[in-house]
Amino acid sequence: MSPALLMVACLCAMNNTLHKQPESQLKTMFLQKTKAAVQYFGSDAPWFEANIPFFECSDRQIEDIYYYRWKLYKAHIRNLGEKGFLITEFLDDVGWQKQPYAMLNDATGFHIYEGRWLRDRRILDGFIDFLYSGGGNDRHFSESIADAAYAYALAKGDLRWATQYLGAMRHIYNLWDDHYDFSKGLYFIEPLLDATEYTISSIDASGGRDGFRGGDAFRPTINAYMYANALAISRLSALVGDIKTSTDYAARAARLKDRVQTALWNDGLKHFTDRYQVSNSHVKYWDFIRGRELAGYVPWVYNLPNNDPKYSSAWSHLLASDEFAGPFGLRTVGPSYEYYQRQYRYLDEHPECQWNGPSWPFQTTQVLLGMANLLNDYSQNVVSRTDYLKLLTQYAHQHYLKGRPNLQEDYNPDTGKPIVGLDRSHHYNHSGFTDLVITGLAGLRPRADDVLEVNPLIPPDGSFPYFCLENIPYHGRSVTIRWDWDGKRYRAGAGLSVYVDGRRRYGPKSLSRVLIPIGKPKLDRSSSPLDKAVNIYRQGFPSPTASSDPEKTIWQAIDGRAWFFPEMIRGWTPGSGVTDPWFALDFGHPVIIGEVRLSFVADDKTYFAPARYTIESWADNAWKKIAEVTNPIANTSNSVRFSPIKINKLRVRFHTTKELRLVELEAYE
């Protein structure tokens, strides 16, 4: 490593970010992890080095976007203090979010599926606790959160941990009876509340005039979600010996499976499609909608359809250029639809989201999850591993904006250009990608037993010559999956190799499904330190004051959110030319503090980290120095620890001649 990289790595280690965990010594060391962390994450490298599985492959864009998506994911982690954590969808606030948390539940399944591969459990432990104990799942949109919680526990090998939420899972499941038609045995929903406004059912229900609201329908989506939630509840109930509940929810899942296949399979279109739940002058109750939608593949995300060529034939539409397969992305609706890509909705003359054709990362993720299941668990000859890799590669390419990774809300599948592109759209967390690499491309297939299953979805012909997914946490163990088609990349044999806790357990051999007994899971249920500075409510205590607040953003510095993307600058600034600026907190009562963390954003143009800062406490009617930090690092968290003291007020004085922006202040015992 060059001296410059070594210096950055050492400085970052001294200014470590949230929740660094000691790493197991039972690991492989094929990849230059520290070098890659600095390359992709700069001064924020230590958090990623401690938390994510590292990856390289022969396709540079897939590799780059894999790391970009982890950077995006971390930016969306919000610390709620005593309420735990959550994962946001938009970086900044939007009007329809759950207040004051800035979250939405429609992409929560993706957030959990992605985050289950972090080493530190405290983030998703806290998020799932917030969803089920803190009121986070408000059913604003259709959801598969019980399934995702089960999938998280499955990856960690800790299913019993998830059983504590069974009561809340059952309660929320039964609340969905308000969207259940007992005569049809199916759930229905308005497309908007299925996160898919302006789809065929809502547009046609308006006679083609609109489509934002209305168009309630029995949809493959919500019924697949409820099927998956029922299975999760059934399996978790069996773990605690509640056979009655387990049997009940297994039966509910079985009934939904049957009804989706018998009622929502459209023989004419050879696809799962909506049927109307409403009747008006334009549409009639129980009629099928008049076209195929990408949403028809969602049942495969949860292995709902039978292993039957009748249903697998639907996947032929996915690859057809005159249907879903756009040259730059999958279409949500095929171009034969009368209102394909007609723009109905605008915000200040800028196009808004619609799902009548645009390529949407949300449903692209679902398609790739479903295709991975199809390739792993079904007998069919409609799609291949080559198709999976082609679509994953296309999806990775879609992440770029002006040559740099910056995921937007939607894209024109025929030109590749973003459609919405609003200020809120930068680094949009409404989809998945890293889980597609881990469980699809690299092929780690989580199981409930003590067996490691690996089945990489790559062609065996050498067209994808190498990859290495290193030290991924699974059941408390460290798993490495390495593919080297001709043995020239890693010089340790040609073929597939799988390592568990640093020891090779398979290979190098030809590409195939691998099953390796690994013994009982090693469990870790660490508790989270409490950030005593966070205040998401913008009132009460802790209460911030500052030397100046020209942008009225003082609360942003203690709201549990921190990111360093230059497209969306965040945090408090005293403004330019302010001498000796300061930022203070009044806790409202005595608290014990032994660590303070500060994050600054810097772009080397407008904002710079201060030369130093001094931390003070209020005692005996005067500010007294606790600690001083010199040469803090920008775009990461700077931590200073001291002997814990009891204080009511905390102040940070900044010594700088340049403009600064404090992204977040955190205080811990």
Image: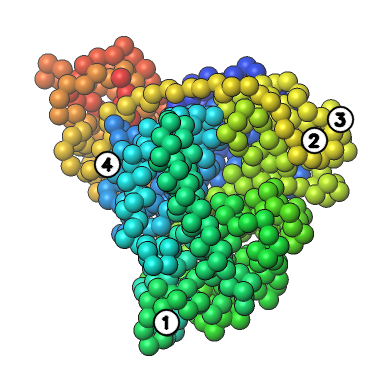
Determine whether 429 is above or below 156 in the image: below
Write down the residue under mark 4. 536
Verify CB contact (< 8 Å) between mark 4 and mark 3.
Answer: no
Please tell me how crowded label 2 is: few (under 14), some (14-19), or many (20+) other residues with Cα within 10 Å.
Answer: many
Q: Residue 106 location, x and y as percent? A: 42, 55
Q: What's under tag 1, amino acid-wise? A: Lys
Q: Nearer the viewer, mark 3 or mark 1?
A: 1
Q: Nearer the viewer, mark 4 or mark 3?
A: 3
Q: What's under tag 4, amino acid-wise? A: Ile
Specify the label residue 284 is tagged with.
1
Earlier residue among tags 2 and 1: 1
Residue at the spot x=54%, y=29% of the render?
157
Horizontally, residue 32 falls left or right of residue 339, namely: right
Cα separation between marks 4 and 3: 53 Å
Earlier residue among tags 1 and 4: 1
Verify CB contact (< 8 Å) between mark 3 and mark 1.
Answer: no
Please tell me how crowded label 3 is: few (under 14), some (14-19), or many (20+) other residues with Cα within 10 Å.
Answer: some
Earlier residue among tags 4 and 3: 3
